[in-house]
Image (cartoon, grey):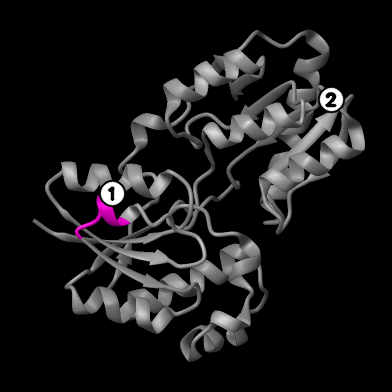
Amino acid sequence: MKNIGMIAGNGRFPFLVAKEIRKQGDRVITVALKEEADKDIEIFSDETVWLSVGKIQKIIDAFKDRNVDTAIMVGQVKHAKIYSAITMDLRAIKIMTSLVNKKTDTILGAVVKEFEKEGISFLPSHIYLKDLLAKNGVIAGKKLNSFETKDAEFGFKMAKAIAGLDIGQTVVVKDKSVLAVESIEGTDECIKRAYSLGGDNAIVVKVAKPNQDFRFDVPVIGTRTIDTLKDNKIRAMIIEANSTLILDKDVVIEKAKQTGVTIIAM
C-alpha cells in the first residue's frame, strides 16, 4: 500500500480519481484547495488537508509529512486564481518572479520542478481514468450536416492553433467565423461570450495542446459542460479523441441526447 498525494481542484474529477486510487489498494492523501475543492472530497480521501492555492511550501510539507513521493493534480483551478498574490507564500512568489512568462504551462511546469526538488513526482492527470478517454466518432446526438462539418473542421484547426500558443484550448465558431477564443476566463465563459455575440447553433471545439503535459492538465467534459451548452443554445461540441476525458459518460450521453446537443470526438 502506497500513499498517493492528490491536489484537488473543483468538479467531479478528484472524486473519480480518488475512488480509483483506493480501488487499486493505495491510500489517498488529499490537499484540497480551499478556493476550489468540494468539501465532500474528504469522504473519498484517507486524509485531507485544506490549503489555499499558492501555498506551495505547505503543500510540499503536507505530502512529505505523510510519506508521499508520488502525486497527481486533478480538478479545475480557475486560471485567475493562479495569479492571485494574496494566497502566495514565499516559495510561490519566488517561482513567479523567476519565470520567463506567466503562461499556464510555464507556471505549472515550474511548480512541478519545485516538488521534484523535494522528491515528489507527478503522474499524468488521466492515468487512473484512461477508460474514460473519448474515442473517435459521434458520441451523442445526430450527425452534423455538411455545413456544420466544415465549421467543425475549421474550428478544430483554429483551436489547435491557439492551444499551441498556450492561449486557451477552446474556440466557438459559426459560419467559418471565430466567435470567441478561450483565455484566462475558462471554457464556460468563452461559450457564454460566443452566444452573446453570435446567437444560437454555434459549434464549440475543445482540444489538447499540441505538446500537452498531462501532469498539469487534461481536457475534460462532464454533465456541467452539457448544461452550459444547452443554456447557450450550442449545436455541437467537438472534442479531441484519445486526449479528452468524459466524466460520468453515460449521464453525459443521455443528457446530450435530451438537450439535442451533438458531441463528436475528432
Prevailing secondary structure of the magenta residues: helix
Look at the numbered disc 1 and give the secondary structure of its residue: helix
Q: Which residue is mark 2?
A: 200
**Percent coordinates x, y for residue 52 in the rendering:** 47, 74
Asked if marks 1 and 2 touch (Cβ < 8 Å), the reply is: no
Q: Which residue is mark 1?
A: 18
**Percent coordinates x, y for residue 54 in the rendering:** 50, 77
Residue range in magenta is 42-46
**In terms of sequence position, does the residue under pointer 1 or pointer 2 come before the other?**
1
Above or below — where is 170 with respect to 239? below
The N terminus lies in quadrant: bottom left
Residue at x 32%, y 46% (from the top left corner): 17
Does 45 appear in magenta? yes
Does 147 appear in magenta? no
Query: Based on the displayed image, in which of its 4 quarters is residue 37 positioned?
Result: bottom left
Q: Tell which residue pokes out farthest to the left in this image.
A: 1
Q: What amino acid is found at the position of numbered circle 1 in the picture?
A: Ala
Above or below — where is 161 with respect to 167? above
The C terminus lies in quadrant: top right
Q: What amino acid is found at the position of numbered circle 2 in the picture?
A: Asp
Q: Tell which residue pokes out farthest to the front in this image.
A: 39
Look at the numbered disc 2 and give the secondary structure of its residue: loop
Residue at x 62%, y 82% (from the top left corner): 85
Query: Based on the displayed image, in which of its 4 quarters is residue 68 positioned?
Result: bottom left
Q: Residues within 10 Å of mark 2 (few under 14, many from 20)?
A: some
Residue at x 73%, y 55% (from the top left corner): 183
Q: Specify whether residue 158 is in view.
A: no
**Percent coordinates x, y for residue 157 in the rendering:** 74, 35
Q: Is residue 85 left or right of residue 124?
A: right
Residue at x 23%, y 69% (from the top left corner): 69
Q: Specify whether residue 154 is in view.
A: yes
Above or below — where is 10 with respect to 127? below
